[in-house]
Image: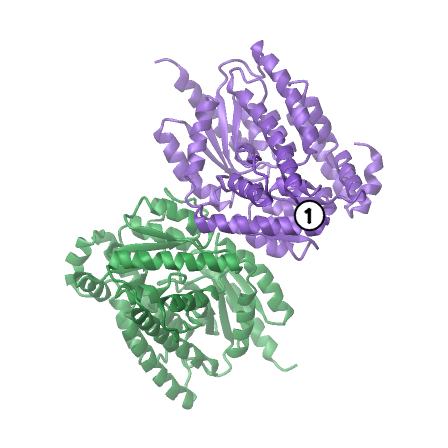
Chain colours: A purple, B green
Amino acid sequence: MSENYNSMWENLGLDLSAHDALLEALGKSYRDIYLAQKHRPQGMGYFDFVMSEVHGLRIKELIDEKAAGRKVIGSFCVFVPEEIVRSAGATLVGLCTGADFATDEAENFLPRNTCSLIKSAFGFKLGKVCPYIESADMIVGENTCDGKKKSYEVLNDLVPNLYVMDLPQMKSDEGRALLKAEYLRFKEAVEKLTGITIDAARLKKGIEIVNNKRKAIYRLLSLRKVDPAPISGLDALLANQVFFYDDPTRFTLSVNKICDELEQRIEKKQGVFPENTPRILISGCPMAVPNWKLPWIIETSGAVIVGEESCVGERGTRNLTHDSASTVDELMEAIVDRYFKVDCAIFTPNPDRLNHIEEMVETYKADGIIHYGLQFCQPYLMESMPVEKALEAKNIPTLRIDTDYSTEDMGQLKTRVEAFVELIKLKHVPT
Amino acid sequence: MSENYNSMWENLGLDLSAHDALLEALGKSYRDIYLAQKHRPQGMGYFDFVMSEVHGLRIKELIDEKAAGRKVIGSFCVFVPEEIVRSAGATLVGLCTGADFATDEAENFLPRNTCSLIKSAFGFKLGKVCPYIESADMIVGENTCDGKKKSYEVLNDLVPNLYVMDLPQMKSDEGRALLKAEYLRFKEAVEKLTGITIDAARLKKGIEIVNNKRKAIYRLLSLRKVDPAPISGLDALLANQVFFYDDPTRFTLSVNKICDELEQRIEKKQGVFPENTPRILISGCPMAVPNWKLPWIIETSGAVIVGEESCVGERGTRNLTHDSASTVDELMEAIVDRYFKVDCAIFTPNPDRLNHIEEMVETYKADGIIHYGLQFCQPYLMESMPVEKALEAKNIPTLRIDTDYSTEDMGQLKTRVEAFVELIKLKHVPT
């Protein structure tokens, strides 16, 4: 990254030396994990560039947008409707939550038994190393899990611009009414922040931009159905992660370009791993940049990841928002419809998620599932046990992994994943 | 307890030998913790009897009620409105959640990092030792914390009669609407279960019975304002616990009788501990029978507990339901009003709780607060840190304790509590 971002970072209030150390560690991880991969699609060069400039050029773009009078809104969750943000000419960005940073400081505000993702958000804020949170004109929290819900009360004292969105816990009529009321309230808040009244034309345009982004990533994910897989799980995850940061129109173009390349690969039966490599579906908690630990372990243990049943994956990107309506109210209804389908474990009951996992196993011809649970993430850890039982009952091998952002358990995880991959291979041997 | 309950327990499907072992352990705890106390009010004899018959005579009463066509409803939470249950001639009982039992079996269904209270509920069911859950015609779960919310999905496969009540997360207009809709749905479910239509007269009567119970326990709690305290914290906790099990009218009479005795004690300046004993307020998670560990440690460490800011305590019992209305809808509104005030940590934000703690410190002349958090109870553990900061800022000594139902940490807890009591005493020495 170019040196001349220092003054920008300084103006944002970042701790330059801590931030330098973070970028160095991030760069090393990226080289070791991403650039060390073989047979990568050429189009991934775009994402290599995006990642190399994730705290540089992308932040400069946001600062430029702000200078031009546009607003930046930061979020921690796929329930924050990007359509609304975009329709007010504002930009939605995911905030840093994917690595341990300033954990000791975070534990002055949060119990130790808090999941890594929440601690990370606090650590990046307290350690002054997240240019996204410092650029944001509004930070949106949402009442998903207890951990996030209650931590926003604490975060509220650490940032000047937190907006909290309530969410339902059940997919009942009252639950939907609550979601709609909250999305209308959010629309008003965005209008107030931006000074722009969101009319039907704007909303339709916002929906179109975000739908296009979803169509592109969904096209990419769908190409992983074939064997050999034309793209690694690590690279597909990266695309899923950049989905939250990048300019949506540019992202859409870049992903579609990769898809063109992958289609050619598929025609030539070129894969990133040999045919018949065991195919793994990951299911569970979100993996934010640079949380690549488990996928890296899986793909260096003789398997390929062919799908992500995750917020950073199909849970977050599937289902388009219908844009055929012509009034603001109807379009808002369509937005509510779309997000009310998200099968997050915060809902009770949540049968759609199991159905989706089983559907993905079939679609992506997965040989087994690795359930990724963040330690202390009660909704996903609780759900993982009945999910595992249901999948095993259908003879779908399932491995439950609970971990955090530390590297301490990597050896143990590698041993478990390797044994799981061997088990899958044995299942394939004709008896 | 009389031997002739064996056939009753057998008919309920209890595991007799495991149940015998449980009762023996419970009896020993009770003798060591409760009967070993000095200067107990005579009226506590009633509660000694209740506890000695908690799985015997009280269960027989419930069975008799069922034989007479009445229904028994079990619950895990103070958000289940007893007024509605009572107005349909049914009985609400708290279910067993206060001790480790069959934890290994429970961990086949729940993550290890689940709070003791939830694991206990599962352990008592799986170990077949809770006659309450086996007697219940309906078991009511409620979407409070993530742990309970998600565990009810699992419990649903273990019991034939689970009813889940949704709850709001914010005290907004939509939150209140959701609570009202859910209470109306619960009323219909109770009507269907009992075959009784709840009219205004019945609802008024139900409110009256429950209000009287609340007035009695509140009278008892209020008498602890004086120094020396006329009743121990352990005994007051027991009354708070039995509140959830006993026949409400008999409970009301018995508590009022103890209050008469305590008023005489106060007149004579008789206390359970000497005057100027350091006065502790407990705040935090509920303590169900036989979870007496922390209060016992506190009251054998030179302090007296003068109040419980807890579901099993004032959080659960304060605030009466207005009964002046004359229509079902108005009375239901009054019930919603009453429960919507409960300052549980599941709500965000939850400023009423801190206000209530500070109010209780003043009312009960507490010298310090011990915040009791169950390990992995995210709502209360998250809230405990800002609560501690706010209290310390007002110069109110606060000790945060996170524990579970095991006895392993008792030595460590005793050391910490003794040090805290010494600190309070030092504060009182004139300099």
Is residue B176 left or right of A38 when viewed as pictured?
Answer: left
Residue A201 visible: yes
Considering only vertical position in the picture, is B409 above or below A250?
A: below
Indicate the chain on which mark 1 is placed: A
Considering only vertical position in the picture, is B82 above or below A158?
A: below
Considering only vertical position in the picture, is A56 above or below B242?
A: above
Rendering coords of residue B107 (x, y %): 38, 44
Of all residues shown, which one is farthest toward the top?
A268
Which quadrant of the rendered structure holds the N terminus of chain B?
bottom left
Is residue B357 left or right of B112 when viewed as pictured?
Answer: right
Residue pictured at 67% horizontal, 30% vertical: A29
Residue pictured at 56% horizontal, 72% vertical: B358
> Dot 1 lies on which element?
loop
Rendering coords of residue A143 (x, y %): 55, 50
Q: Amino acid at mark 1?
A: Thr
Is residue B367 left or right of A36 when viewed as pictured?
Answer: left
Residue marked by disc 1? A197
Callout 1: few (<14), some (14-19), or many (20+) C-alpha neighbours within 10 Å?
some
Which quadrant of the rendered structure holds the C terminus of chain B?
bottom right
Considering only vertical position in the picture, is A248 above or below A129?
A: above
